[in-house]
Image (tube, rainbow, N blue to C red):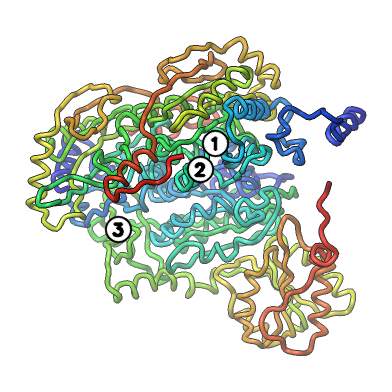
């Protein structure tokens, strides 16, 4: 169905990524936003607070992140689309409830504007070190979807897509942005409402006595209900059967937890979105996501000027991970170069899928800044020249690391 | 515990509220047949988050009547409780306060480590109605598993209140006992001998103190604008026509 | 402007002449000066009052630990020359409980803001008060979340503006002395950054009190609260305090609500005795085991 015209702020804007994501959420029909201020994500929440009352979206600043995520889950079960916005420390606090949301197959969106970590870290500067946490952060087995936009325009577009994916697959969707993209101000074009596709919630519409809350449709996703419809919902975070009643033994667990995982794994081809360029005859492929992919554009350009055949693979969807694509490319290329603003997270999944058929080079970065494009082009060059097969992940020594560790850091007086 | 459920059910009946509109987020693990008998929507949520979840439910659909039944209200859920009371979210919180009941040297003695029990080893419990009232709850009451009629009446009354109501119920928790029948009788006798009804008592004075009678009753009953009322009033004032009041009339 | 900046740099980097030391130098981390607080901020006043109180109460600085959370006031731990801990958001009281219970000889001072202590830290606040953990909590209340850019706080008055209440705050604020009192705190006082002398006396008293003490310090925030609400700058706020504060010692804490630009009641409201957590613990332990932990 199409977006509602009152929700969409059609026009051409010059706004930052946070605000664009906020407008995207409102355009997607988000009717409750519960948040807690945390740098660098506050602007998204503030934008939704300003515009929300004008489009019928309720906002509430909860007392802490536990409250925010719980309120979001409650709102979804009362029948509306809901979202929360946070960054590193808040994300860690929300983990229990994210697992709860995954277990209950609650569709919601969580916008994580990553910052320098760990712990309080560097609140005002960028980082990409929550990527593994977005997949494995909560305890237990579950799968969810994580998207990594790289510009304010994508923040708008992919927030809407995130809501659509959440409704379609009844799972939490993480928008793993970062401070750089969140605070970057660029042109954002918001189209007319009738050009925006919204996935409606798949409510159960049959007779109440026949309702089975967790009985899946052929695509492994059950129809959802909401409180107050007289269906006598029994919704629990314990492992449950189709009726929602708790079960204990291993047969049941094999059936019901398996479906939670399969729901995403078996629908991977419909969920994963990648942006691939010049990978057919490439010697080296740069695998990147988020702000690093934008920096990589320059690095790749410099490498190409030197005559190296470089392709790029941008992971728009980071989870579920595009195993098949990497396995396929590993057979053809010499090496993968993975620039990340962390000390190695997604690169390990790339290495896992390579099965030793291609080299894997990590260009790490501690955060509070982005890569130097020259590092990326140098890494590409050395990877292209390397004919030996090297096991494991090779770390490329960046200029920054050379300054810090070899020449020594001077503490300012 | 069963008497609490039936009192709750009776209370819903007395209030005249449509059961289908009642949502019960709770960390107490009710069994499916209990929930079916109550006829409400039940959500078993992680410890302590019943009120926050309930806030989401209420804000998402203001026509719902949300009744968080909290087994663990003050430990993990303490923050949500005090802030929910401050905002006057329209919730009816039923807090089940169970004293673990042990047999020491053949003599039954109530003792527990919880934040509520006066018989706890070395911590003073919360004076729960007082804390709730001082944070802004509009209706506070305490009953025991013995006072089922009064509890049903309280529930019926509180379901019509606009704001955060809290009813503390002293009841034996079902998980701790092996010998449930005899212990339940012992505990009911204990409540009978040691509780006294004092309606409209100042909540400051209703702390549960060892060796003194447990004071039960309906303590406070007042009115205050709810969160949604306040939200609507403030936004209508500033935005005028551009704003549609959320939820129309409350419930 | 350039000349003023150069002058300030000179002052800060000039070596102190012989015999000339700043009176607070032994209690402040001078190598981290200048601090990050804005012009018009009242936190600096609270810090100097605290440093004076430490001296007045004759506390051994080696046995005092200061714990802060996240926020503008949360930066205090970084500027005070005691054992300082800058913890995660909302957890200074929990952290301080750990320090105190593990080593009862250390006096714990939690110095943080209204958002950190009462919003996300609300649970720790009421439980520590209930348990009567021996610590002093200095809560600097500027009615807003200043560090993150001016969002609404649980103390923001009704109808006041903040970035996350762009049409006015819709939630009634907390009355910090009331919640501290009803949770069981043994010493509760409120002052503003204008009443520095009284604040120093209160802090000195609270430092020597056994049990959970709370001193609320009302402070201007020129960058966000008073700017967004068009209340002028720090000096205008101080003038407002001067004209609108009423000192009423022993007032019932339930009458201490602060509305938007209304009268503020200050004073010492609660000063009572209750067995502290460690006292009760020792009592229990000696009953059970016949031993006890050192009472500091």
- Give the side of residue A182 with respect to residue C155, left or right: right
3D distance between C-alphas at marks 1 and 2 = 8 Å
> Which residue in the protein does label 1 denote?
C109
- Give the side of residue A21 with respect to residue B142, left or right: right
Label drawn at residue A206: 3
Identify whether A369 is placed above or below A288. Answer: above
> Which residue in the protein does label 2 denote?
C96
The one nearer the camera, A60 or C117, is C117
Q: Residue, x 33% and y 27% (percent of image)?
A: B138
3D distance between C-alphas at marks 1 and 3 = 61 Å
3D distance between C-alphas at marks 3 and 2 = 56 Å
Identify whether B240 is placed above or below A109. Answer: above
The one nearer the camera, C174 or A209, is C174
- Give the side of residue B214 with respect to residue A233, left or right: left
Which label's residue is closer to the chain start, 1 or 2? 2
Q: Residue, x 26% and y 34% (percent of image)?
A: B159
């Amino acid at each position: 169905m199409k977006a509602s015209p009152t929700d969409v702020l059609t026009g051409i804007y010059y706004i930052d990524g946070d605000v664009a994501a906020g407008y995207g959420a409102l355009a997607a029909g988000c009717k409750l936003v519960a948040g807690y201020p945390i740098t660098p994500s506050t602007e998204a929440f503030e934008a939704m607070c300003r515009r929300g009352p004008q489009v019928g979206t309720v906002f509430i600043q909860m007392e802490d992140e536990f409250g925010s995520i719980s309120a979001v889950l409650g709102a979804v079960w009362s029948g509306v689309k809901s979202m929360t916005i946070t960054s590193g420390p808040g994300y860690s606090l929300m983990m229990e409830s994210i697992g709860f949301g995954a277990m209950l197959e609650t569709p919601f969106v969580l916008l994580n504007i990553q910052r320098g970590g760990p712990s309080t870290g560097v609140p005002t500067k960028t980082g990409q070190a929550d990527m593994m946490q977005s997949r494995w952060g909560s305890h237990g087995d579950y799968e969810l979807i994580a998207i990594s936009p790289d510009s304010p325009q994508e923040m708008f577009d992919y927030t809407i897509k995130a809501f659509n994916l959440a409704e379609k697959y009844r799972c939490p969707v993480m928008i793993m942005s970062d401070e750089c993209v969140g605070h970057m101000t660029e042109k954002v074009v918001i189209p007319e409402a009738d050009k925006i596709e919204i996935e409606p919630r798949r409510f159960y519409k049959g007779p109440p006595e026949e309702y089975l809350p967790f009985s899946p449709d052929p695509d492994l996703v059950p129809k959802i209900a909401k409180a107050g419809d007289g269906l006598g919902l029994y919704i629990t975070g314990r492992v449950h059967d189709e009726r929602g009643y708790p079960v204990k033994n291993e047969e049941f667990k094999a059936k019901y937890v398996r479906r939670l995982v399969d729901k995403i794994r078996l629908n991977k081809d419909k969920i994963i979105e990648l942006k691939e360029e010049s990978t057919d005859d490439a010697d080296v492929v740069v695998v990147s996501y988020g702000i690093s992919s934008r920096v990589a554009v320059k690095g790749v350009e410099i490498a190409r000027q030197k005559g190296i055949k470089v392709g790029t693979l941008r992971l728009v969807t980071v989870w579920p991970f595009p195993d098949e694509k990497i396995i396929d490319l590993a057979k053809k290329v010499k090496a993968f170069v993975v620039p990340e603003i962390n000390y190695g997270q997604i690169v390990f999944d790339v290495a896992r899928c390579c099965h030793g058929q291609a080299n894997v080079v990590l260009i790490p970065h501690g955060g509070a800044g982005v890569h130097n494009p020259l590092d990326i082009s140098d890494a590409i060059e050395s990877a292209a020249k390397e004919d030996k097969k090297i096991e494991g992940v090779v770390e490329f020594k960046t200029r920054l690391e050379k300054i810090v560790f070899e020449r020594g850091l001077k503490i300012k007086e | 515990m069963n008497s609490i459920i039936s009192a709750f059910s009776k209370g819903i009946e007395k209030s005249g509220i449509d059961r289908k509109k009642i949502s019960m987020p709770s960390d107490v693990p009710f069994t499916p047949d209990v929930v079916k008998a109550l006829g409400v929507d039940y959500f078993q949520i992680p410890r302590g988050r019943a009120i926050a979840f309930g806030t989401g439910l209420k804000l998402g659909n203001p026509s719902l009547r949300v009744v968080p039944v909290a087994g663990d209200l003050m430990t993990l859920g303490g923050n949500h409780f005090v802030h929910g009371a401050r905002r006057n979210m329209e919730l009816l919180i039923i807090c089940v306060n169970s004293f673990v009941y042990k047999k020491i040297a053949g003599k039954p003695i109530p003792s527990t480590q919880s934040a509520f029990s006066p018989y706890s080893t070395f911590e003073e419990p919360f004076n729960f109605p007082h804390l709730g009232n001082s944070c802004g709850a509009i209706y506070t009451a305490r009953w025991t598993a013995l006072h089922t009629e009064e509890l049903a009446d309280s529930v019926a009354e509180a379901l019509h209140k606009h704001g955060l109501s809290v009813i503390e119920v002293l009841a034996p928790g079902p998980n701790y006992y092996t010998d449930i029948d005899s212990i339940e009788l012992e505990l009911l006798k204990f409540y009978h001998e040691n509780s006294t009804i004092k309606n409209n008592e100042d909540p400051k004075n209703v702390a549960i103190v060892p060796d003194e009678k447990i004071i039960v009753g309906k303590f406070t009953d007042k009115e205050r604008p709810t969160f949604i009322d306040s939200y609507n009033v403030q936004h209508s004032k500033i935005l005028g026509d551009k704003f549609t009041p959320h939820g129309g009339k409350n419930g | 402007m350039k000349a003023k900046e150069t002058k300030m740099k000179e002052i800060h980097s000039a070596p102190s002449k012989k015999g000339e030391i700043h009176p607070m130098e032994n209690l402040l981390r001078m190598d981290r000066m200048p601090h990050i607080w804005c012009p018009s901020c009242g936190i600096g006043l609270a810090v100097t009052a605290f440093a004076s109180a430490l001296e007045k109460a004759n506390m051994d600085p080696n046995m005092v630990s200061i714990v802060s959370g996240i926020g503008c006031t949360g930066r205090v731990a970084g500027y005070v020359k005691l054992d300082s801990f800058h913890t995660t958001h909302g957890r200074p009281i929990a952290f301080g409980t750990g320090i105190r219970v593990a080593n009862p000889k250390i006096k714990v001072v939690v110095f943080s803001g209204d958002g950190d202590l009462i919003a996300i830290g609300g649970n720790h606040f009421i439980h520590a008060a209930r348990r009567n953990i021996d610590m002093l909590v200095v809560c600097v209340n500027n009615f807003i979340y200043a560090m993150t850019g001016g969002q609404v706080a649980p103390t923001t008055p009704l109808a006041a503006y903040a970035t996350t209440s762009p049409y006015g705050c819709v939630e009634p604020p907390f009355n910090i002395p009331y919640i501290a009192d009803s949770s069981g705190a043994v010493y509760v006082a409120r002052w503003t950054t204008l009443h520095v002398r009284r604040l120093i006396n209160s802090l000195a008293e609270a430092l020597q009190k056994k049990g959970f003490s709370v001193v609320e310090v009302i402070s201007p925030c020129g960058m966000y609260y008073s700017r967004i609400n068009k209340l002028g700058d720090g000096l205008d706020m101080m003038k407002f305090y001067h004209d609108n504060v009423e000192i009423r010692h022993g007032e019932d804490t339930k009458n201490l609500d602060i509305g938007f630009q209304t009268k503020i009641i200050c004073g010492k409201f609660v000063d009572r005795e209750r067995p502290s957590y460690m006292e009760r613990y020792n009592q229990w332990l000696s009953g059970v085991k016949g031993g006890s932990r050192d009472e500091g």
